[in-house]
Structure formats: structure tokens, C-alpha cells
Image (cartoon, grey):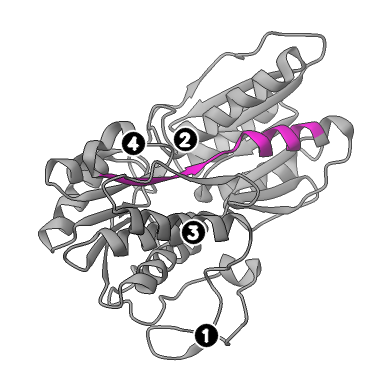
Amino acid sequence: MTLKSGLVLAAILTLPTSAMADDPTKVGFVYVGPIGDHGWSYQHDQGRLALEDHFGEKVATTYVENVSEGADAERTIRRLAQAGNDIIFTTSFGFMNPTLRVAKEYPDITFLHATGYKRDENLGTYLSVTYEGRYATGVAAGLATETDTLGYIASFPIPEVIRDINAVYLGAKEVNPDIELKVIWVNTWFDPAKEADAANALMDQGADVIVQHTDSPAPLIAADKRGAWGVGQASDMRGFGGDAHLLSVVNNWGPYYIETVQSVMDGTWEPADYWGGMSEGTVEVVGLSERLSAEQQEKVNSVIDALTNDEFHPFTGPLKDQSGELRVPAGVSMTNEELAGMDWYVEGMTATLSK
């Protein structure tokens, strides 16, 4: 869902999808896009289904899709609270303040907000450490490109997007010192037509690998039509890309949702800031193209293994910003708190940040 004014997609409130039992724990989900986006919202809904499969009649889940960030989100979250949900997951950055406001009104309900940073006694935060998958993406893209030019379709200029752009560039730079990463800001999470247009514009500028921080497979499809490479976002998109599919960075939310709901049931839940990456299985890199040479595949897989085994942190110094100012000293890795506020590009990036 976008921040565009004047466009509020209809929210569709589903009926509970799990079989009812005596006093099941009621769990609500709020999605920014449709569950059929085959990306971000789709993967969160797969996590909801995993929750149902795990607990059976012990839970009753409800979801609302296509919820705009802003006033519409607050109304939707409040409606789920009024409906008697015990736990509510809100799954987009722009839901942060609406979630906080409703959480203050309903202190007996447990709220979890994805990708944000504001917490309260009954409000926790969680995110997937996608920059790890993005770093591996950069390595693969840096090896695959023939033009030394990569394209990145960026949604909104918020830290989670900026750090992922930086991670792609740093990964590509590791294997290709001549790399350039071009960025187009589309100011939407899900708009297939706009995403495809951005992909084509980047390819017109010479990019032959397209990375996206938007939720439909449209950029991957566009890349396939023009003989370029594309990267799946949030879910396994290899079914859409044909020969263009380089790899997909997948969010696996099921284990986190199951663990969180269990802790609420047990009375042990406490508000926290969960960062789940490749070592936790929250982020997975899948479908690496066999069109890469054996040597290239070996390099990418070695990076994936290092990230999965916590042997390497992509944001380890020395790191400078675009102005040449040292931001991270040699041998020091950025903390989660620092990464949560990242608002600068690393040295070597030629793109400008959207305001």
C-alpha cells in the first residue's frame, strides 16, 4: 500500500479461517497490499497460515488486506481490537503511529509492528534482516552484469530501504569494483504498472540487473522480456522470471509468528525489538540461477553460507558515506540501533537520496 493521498483501496475483512474451539486465541493481521501480491503481504499471509497449521483450533485468525498507511490503518487496527483479537500484527512501516495509538487504547491486547521502532508495554517490533539477503544479491548481481550497471526500484526513503540499497552496492562492489547502482524512487509498495515502468527506465539507462524493494513480480517480468536479470522480493518469484530470475530473497515469517503467539499464550511475552536474519531462518536466499558459471555460483553460495553462519556482517567498517566522512571505523560492525536510523548512502554511490 502506498502513502498516496486520495487513493484508499477497499480493505477486505475476512472471516476467521481456523476452526473455532473453546476460547481460541484470536490473532489479527493487517496487510498493506493484497495477499496475492506474490511478495511482502503474500509472505506474511503464509506466516499466518503456518500459525493456523501449527496451533489448529487453539487459534482463530483474521486478516485485512489492502490497507492504506495512515488514517485507514488506524481505523482498521481499532476495528480488529474492538472485534476481540488478543494479538494484532501490523505489517508495514507506515502502520507504526496508528499501531501505537491504538495500543495505548487497548492495554490488554498484544500488538506487534513490523519494521518500525516505536514500542510500548503492550507493543513490540519485528523485522527481517533483509540487508543480509541484499548483500548476497549484490554479489550475484556484480558477477552477472555485463554493463557494470545495476538498477534498484526503491519504495520510500526510509532506513530499511536505504540500508538494503547500500547492502546491494557493497556486495556488488566486493566482486566488481566498476559497479554503478542506479536508483528510481516510486513511492509505493505495490503498483505493478509503476514498478514495470521503473524497471524499463532503469534498463533504458543501461542496467542489466534489476533489484526491487516493491512487492509485485512486475519488474522481474519486465526484465525477462528484455533479456535482463531480475531479483525476487520477499517471496520466491522464480516462477515469474523465466531465465531472468537471478535469485529471490525470501521472508519466512511462520516461525516468528508461532513463537510469538506461543509466548502470549504462556504469559511470557515481553515487548522487544526482534531482528531475524539468515541465521534465524527468517531470511532465505533461494533459486540462484544456474546460468551463472560454476565459479560464480560457488562465490555466491560461499557468501550465503557466511551470512547464515554469522561469520560476516555486511556493515562492518571502515565505511564512509558519499561525502567521504568515516561513519563506521575499521573492524566495527553497525548496531541494530544505528542500522535502524540509516539515512545515508555509502561511499561510491552516485545516486541521490529521495527527500
How many neighbours does mark 4 have within 10 angstroms: few (below 14), some (14-19), or many (20 or more)?
A: many
Mark 2 or mark 4, earlier in chain: 2
How many neighbours does mark 3 have within 10 angstroms: few (below 14), some (14-19), or many (20 or more)?
A: few
Question: Relative to 22, is 242 above or below?
Answer: below
Where residue 277 appears, x then y in whole percent? 60, 52
Mark 2 or mark 1, earlier in chain: 2
Residue at the image point whose x is 41% and y is 67% from the top: 171
Q: CA distance from mark 1 to mark 3?
A: 22 Å
Q: Secondary structure at mark 4?
A: helix
Residue wearing tag 1: 318
Q: Which mark is residue 302?
A: 3
User: Which image quarter is the N terminus in?
Assistant: top left
Residue type of the residue flagged with mark 2: Ser
Q: Secondary structure at mark 1?
A: loop
Left or right: 78, with 200 as reference point:
right
Residue type of the residue flagged with mark 1: Pro
Residue wearing tag 4: 238
Mark 1 or mark 3, earlier in chain: 3
Comparing labels 3 and 2, the label whose residue is closer to the camera: 3
Q: CA distance from mark 4 to mark 1?
A: 35 Å
The region drawn magenta spans 245-262
Residue at the image point whose x is 70% and y is 40% from the top: 111
Does the image show residue 84?
A: no
Residue type of the residue flagged with mark 4: Arg
- CB contact under 8 Å: marks 1 and 3: no
Comparing labels 2 and 1, the label whose residue is closer to the camera: 1
